[in-house]
Amino acid sequence: MEIIRRNKQYFLIILVLIATFAFIQMKFKLFYGSNNIGIGLIGTFQEHDLPLEVVRLVSSGLISMDEAGRVKPNLVSGWETNNDATEFKFKLKDDLKWADGGKIVSQDLEFSIPDVEVTYPNEKEILFKLKDSYSPFPTLLTKPVLKKGTLLGLGPYKISKVEKSRIFITKIILTPNDPKLPVIYIRFYPSEKTALTGFSLGEVQALLGINNIKYFSNNPVVLVKQKTDYSKIVTALFSVKDSLLSNRSLRQALSFISPKVDKEEVADNPFPPNSWGYDKSAKKYLNNPDEAKSALERAQSNLPADKMHAEIILTSTPNLEEVGKQVTAAWKSLGFDVKLRVESGIPQNFQALLITQSIPLDPDQYFLWHATQTKTNLSGLDSKRVDKDLEDGRKITPEQDRKAKYYDFQKALLEEAPAIFLYFPKYNIVYLKKSEGLLNKILSL
């Protein structure tokens, strides 16, 4: 006791430090247990729009899709559709249970799909009535389902805690149903910069969907996993109504001269190569100077001489700036005055635009290329043949009949050349080497 009295000041300092550390650990979880892992995601989310990386751990969809984009039953035993693809009836599998052990009935599920009426004939069936024919409708039911009004699913994890800042989620704790799986602390960061800071400070041991992997190139304790993301495509879109780029032969010339980006999987088509709708015999562009020269000669016959050295501005998003430099260098070789402009958003007016677009696993790309889709058909393409193929492809059901339509769609679209399909980007996962075992358990689910 005498020692404590003589060193009272030091003991008080130690107690304050211990209490402060305990509070920080409880609040921020800077250090995790041996079977816990912190994962960082970039973006702002609310409870009703949780990212797929989170929801897929909590539940699964009525339907799943294979790598070729074909649908197959998941939580349902099957489904029926009428002849004009405006009604779809799904039957739930027997003995499905929520993570809390409660029986799943059809009325537990809530769907919000525009122009679709949802009814529940009985506890096992769900009936969807569509305003218009849409044969790929089952592909809309791959999103993991949650019990109505809750965050309860039927996957390997339960959401045990949600922390918010105003309306946006800052942290979610996922508790496993199997004790062999790790507890997951998911943090949400508003930008990649803040995510990198959080990773450096030890707030998380892994970052999903990061772009700037060069930041970690010389760090021996950090590893990077990469996989090709076939749900996205890096594309240089042309404004087909631009006074210069309205010339189809010129668009073809720029497409032929564009480079294949090193270490990226080439996208010579609007569909990924593993899609059941992909036509491997369709026209190929990229890195073909001879064809570029021929197309340029065709363009010259329809353009004034001064247009052949006109200015072309390629607008790029910041993360694609280096790719934009490669593309503009190639275009300059055709004699044009090409400039690269970097903007954070999508401009309303552009000549050419380099962006990453989301594409569906199903070949239906109506929203990207049909003339009526003015908000998402960014190139302004208006092709009667393309429109007809897209319209027919979503009205008929047999795969072979749909495939014929999408083969013709590819032929027509690539001939029109409203865009250059460059590559399918990588999905990057950055993580601490010591956390690899725990992360692999999660990624394998």
Image: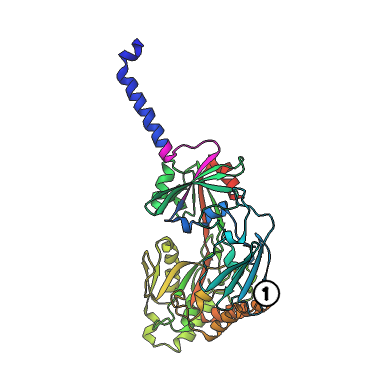
Q: Is residue 146 above or below residue 21?
A: below
Toward the viewer: 103 or 170? 103
When asked about the image quadrant of residue 285, the answer is bottom right
Q: Position of residue 355 (x, y in %)?
A: 45, 67
Q: Position of residue 172 (x, y in %)?
A: 47, 48
Q: Is residue 38 magenta?
A: yes
| Residue that appears at 41% across and 82% down | 241
Left or right: 114 as drawn, with respect to 89: left
Tally of numbered tags? 1
- Does the image show residue 84? yes
Q: Secondary structure at mark 1?
A: helix
Here the colouring is rainbow
Left or right: 231 as drawn, with respect to 346: right
| Residue that appears at 44% across and 42% down | 203
Toward the viewer: 439 or 250? 439
Instruction: Give, as a three-letter code, the residue at label 1.
Output: Glu
The range drawn in magenta is 26-40
Left or right: 95 as drawn, with respect to 219: right
When asked about the image quadrant of residue 436, the answer is top right
Q: Position of residue 12 (x, y in %)?
A: 33, 22
Q: Label 1: which residue?
A: 399
Q: Is residue 352 above or below residue 37?
A: below
